[in-house]
Structure formats: structure tokens, C-alpha cells
Amino acid sequence: MRGLSVLAQLGVLAFMLVLLSEIMSHSMWGGEGNAPSTLDFAVALFGEWWLATVVLGALLSMAMIGASYLVRDERLVNLIWDMEGDQ
């Protein structure tokens, strides 16, 4: 089972590397070797796509708050132990 997990992780890594190289070599960037820089990415993300960035950030914040609420353990035994301390 552990080997299958490692194999799956390596497969996902290889897929991401192939996908990234295909995206960076696409003709929409203005030809070969003219990939966007990190500055271009930052300007696009916070300049042209600012609303999508804010909405995505709000959605991710709500998801994290909801996940932390769902993980809380509110059984009576644990609540009493928390209130008594380490006695």
C-alpha cells in the first residue's frame, strides 16, 4: 500500500511538471523562450484579477473556518477535562 502511495505521488509530480512545461511553452506567451516572469504574474494576479483573488481568498477562509469547526471535539468528557485542567 505504501508503494502504491509513493507511485501515485510520483505520478502526480510528473504530471504537474509536464503540465507546467506545456503551459510555459504555449504560443500565447509570445513565442518560444518568452515565458512570463514572476513580476508579470504578480501584476496580472493583483492588477487585472484582483476581484477573483479576493473572492477566492474569502472562499478559502470560509472553508478553513468551517473545517476547524467540524474538527472540534465537543464530547462531554473532553469538555470537562478541558475545564479542570491538568490536575
Image: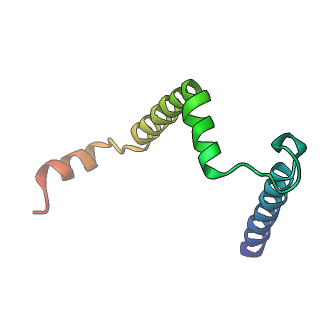
Image quarter where the N terminus lies is: bottom right
Residue depicted at 71% across the width and 74% down the height: 2
- As displayed, is residue 27 above or below residue 34? above
- State left or right for residue 10 relative to residue 61: right
- State left or right for residue 47 relative to residue 6: left
Residue depicted at 88% across the width and 54% down the height: 32
Q: Which residue ends up furthest to the bottom in the rendered image?
A: 3
Image quarter where the C terminus lies is: bottom left
- As displayed, is residue 87 above or below residue 38? below
Residue depicted at 81% across the width and 64% down the height: 14
Residue 39, given in percent of the width and then of the height, sits at 59, 47
> Which of the 4 image quarters holds residue 27?
top right
- As displayed, is residue 11 above or below residue 3? above
In the rendered picture of this protein, how many numbered marks are placed on residues?
0
Between 86 and 18, the one lying in front of the other is 18
Residue 36, given in percent of the width and then of the height, sits at 72, 48
Residue 63, given in percent of the width and then of the height, sits at 50, 35
> Which of the 4 image quarters holds residue 76?
top left
Residue 65, given in percent of the width and then of the height, sits at 42, 36
Q: What colour scheme was applied to this rendering of the protein?
A: rainbow
> Which of the 4 image quarters holds residue 75?
top left
